[in-house]
Amino acid sequence: KEPTLGNPQNTIEILQKYEFNFQKKFGQNFLIDTHVLDKIISSAEITKDDFVLEIGPGIGTMTQYLACAAREVAAVEIDKALIPILEDTLSGYENVTIINDDILKVDIAGLAQEKNGGRPIKVVANLPYYITTPIIMGLFENHVPLDSITVMVQKEVADRMQVGPGSKDYGALSLAVQYYAQPYIVANVPPNCFMPRPKVGSAVIRLTRHEKPPVQVEDERFMFSLIRASFNQRRKTLANGLKNAGTLGLSKEKIIQAIEELGKGANVRGEALTLEDFAALSNIILKKED
Ligand code: SAM
């Protein structure tokens, strides 16, 4: 079945038919540009073997495109006012399941098990921007079997995910994303491709899950606590940032020794460290604990 949605006229028709009111709190900006939709689908490289999870289908625009390309689609939408609309726009698409729930409460690993026998799934979405980071981190940290995540996010967040040391956008999110996946910005998308128009620019980013993490870490959780502590106090040196992070419970001497062992100067800042550096630093500190 060919998609019927993806342009302004059809979107307006549906919204009026159901007297739908946009809910700001749910980050609702619906796509109204077929070129952007085609670009998302092609960069996600969906095949008829794939099970796709869509987060926030809205009125079902991208869901129609996904249903055509994939074997099966599950679409999780929090706004119950959209459910009757989705039942309408997706009638005739036999391979789509609509789930009315908050994505942050859904057992996605369980869904992947049930729908895809635990094999890696593809996540494709025009994300609600107010929860981009918890959604992405949840997918990585909750051991969801993942092939790739192809999502529309705020442009600035896409930049943060893919930069390295030396950029003002570099931070904990960059390191977390790059530990789990290879990021690639597929396209920049201007506000006029959405209804209503968002106040910020958007970008489609594809995160391809690493088969093996790019660095060897003894204790992932400890490395991420170090990373968070280093960037919480951006203007401080790494040594001071880590010393002040009470939850880490590290003495100043131990921190200074570890930084020296890493081969960095005493005044180095966290934002100058690569993922490899953070992995090595966390392994050095843990070895000292033994
Ligand atoms: N996919 C549609 C499109 O591209 O036209 C809509 C995208 S819109 C940016 C985000 C969608 O996510 C909205 O439909 C919104 O209601 C939904 N949403 C917001 N918070 C959610 C949550 N916690 N769980 C599931 N869906 C959510």
Image (cartoon, helix red, strand yellow):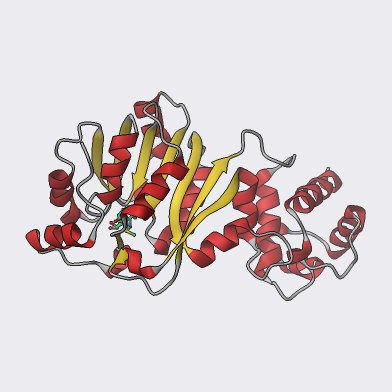
The residue furthest top is 117
Image quadrant of ligand 1? bottom left
Residue 35's place in the image compared with 119, above or below, is below
Is residue 104 visible in this depiction of the protein? no
**Residue 218 percent across, percent down from the top left:** 74, 40
The x and y percentages for residue 92 are 15, 35
Name which quarter of the figure residue 252 lies in.
bottom right
Q: Residue furthest left?
A: 17
Q: In which quarter of the image is the N terminus?
A: top left
Quarter-wise, where is residue 159 in the image?
bottom right
Q: Position of residue 49 (x, y in %)?
A: 39, 26
Residue in view at x 66 percent, y 55 percent:
225
Q: Which residue is drawn at 41% across and 62% down?
A: 129
Residue drawn at x 7%, y 59% is 17
| Foreground residue among 172 and 96 | 96
In this rendered view, identify the residue nearer to me: 272 or 102.
272
Percent position of residue 69, x then y = 34, 35
